[in-house]
Image: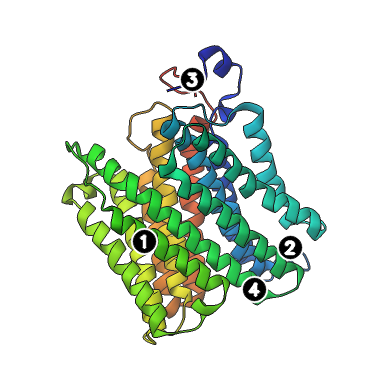
Amino acid sequence: MQVLDRRKALSIHPLWRLGFRPFFLGGCLFALFAVPLWLAALSGWLGEWHPAGGWLVWHRHELLFGFAMAIVAGFLLSAVQTWTGRPGLHGRPLLLLAGVWLLARLAWLSDLPLAWLSVLELAFPLAMAAVMARTLWLVRQKRNYPVVALLLLLAAVDGLSLVGLANADEGLQRQAVLAGVWLVAAMMGLIGGRVIPFFTQRGLGRVNAVQPWPWLDWLLLLGSVAVAVLHVVGLALQAGGMYGMLFALLTLGHGLRLWRWYEAGVWRVPLLWSLHLAYAWLALACLGMALWHFGLLSGQSQALHALTVGAMGGLILAMIARVSLGHTGRMLTPPKGLNLAFILLHLGALSRVGLIEIWPFWGLWLAAACWALAFALFVWRYGPMLCSARVDGHPG
């Protein structure tokens, strides 16, 4: 595999040697402050200050296109080096890409004209798609072309959300963001379907990993993309049995995957149970959506937050905890405090999905506190390793 030579690597600050470093750290710092900021706004503590479109629009957009997309970028920019054998983005190009992401986050909180906000916002996912497409094309790695397609679709729905913002059409903006959420769910299913059985095999010392079923992989990928399309056109926001069947199929597919991957030993390994539990939230979110479409659940909110807090937040925290250890040359044993972070994240998801129905105020604040503390623990324990050279002396 082609990697940076040692001399060139040593001339670059460790933070800019591979994409997981700035984007995992920046994304988690953003997550740490974004949810408390949202609750402060919701409580009326921020006075007249409000971002473009208002705080609800900001909350919907930024937890997806700000936080989740940063983590997606960090993972893909690092994984593509392993996939293709070519050096990942590093040095000034990586610094520039991270700067575009950061400027877009600041622009949303400022009074920057919408045209400039749109340029900064869309530059990031389009640049990501271009980098991934070029690297994959150079080695003709067709297996990962769907990743580029998903990035382009995410850029498209991000653009649609900006159209909604420009026209003061909150309904369109919401449809676009929800479409983006399900596109990320598609990516979670695509990447999770590859790495979770592999990580489980390695973590438990098994000889072979559970082999994928390609038909199931394609079913889940295309099903999630179909859900995203239904959100774009507004049909998924209308209860209906046909849509309920689609979500029921996704529930069965994700549940079948979990059943095939599961071994009792995962509960002894925090880096494994955290992954499996996060993926279970994805199946639960699909089940919740199916129940809503069948008229058995009063609203979509709980299913949506099972997806965004439990599945997306949980899978992100578990993945970056493991990937960061591997890419910094460390043993795959999380540092002290990360087990608590995993527990807090899932406790927060339970609070946001369940407790909030009983005690709305305390459920919401407990969920926010657990989320913020979980990512604070990651930043505290992993920040120093992300900003320092690999412990094994390997460049990267």
Q: Nearer the viewer, mark 2 or mark 3?
A: 3
Q: CA distance from mark 1 to mark 4?
A: 25 Å
CB within 8 Å, label 1 to label 3: no
Which percent across, then down, holds residue 17?
55, 27
Measured Cα–Cα span from mark 2 to mark 4? 18 Å
| Rendered position, 330 above or below 8 | below
Q: Which residue is mark 3?
A: 395
Whichever of callouts 2 and 1 sits on the residue coming sooner in the sequence is: 2
Relative side of 200 to 158, left or right: left
Q: What residue is at 44 percent from the left and 58 percent from the top?
A: 186
Residue 388: tell me if it is visible.
yes
Q: Secondary structure at mark 3?
A: loop
For mark 4, give the secondary structure. helix
Task: Say which label, 2 or 4, has the lower sequence index.
Answer: 2
User: Circle 1 sits on which residue?
Assistant: 220
26 or 376: nearer the viewer: 26
Say which residue appears at 22% left-offset and 42% top-offset.
209
Q: Secondary structure at mark 1?
A: helix
- Between 377 and 91, the one nearer to me in the picture: 91
State how far apart marks 2 and 3 are (Cα): 41 Å
Amino acid type shown at disc 1: Leu
Residue at mark 2 to residue at mark 1: CA–CA distance: 36 Å
> From the viewer's perspective, is the residue at label 2 or at label 4 nearer?
4
Q: What is the spatial separation of the Cα atoms under label 1 and label 3, in whole angstroms?
A: 37 Å
The residue that mark 4 highlights is 172
> Nearer the observer, disc 2 or disc 1?
1
Q: Within the image, what quadrant is residue 102 found in?
A: top right
**Three-letter amino acid code of the residue under disc 3:** Pro
C-alpha gap between disc 4 and disc 3: 46 Å
Classify 333 as above or below 244.
above
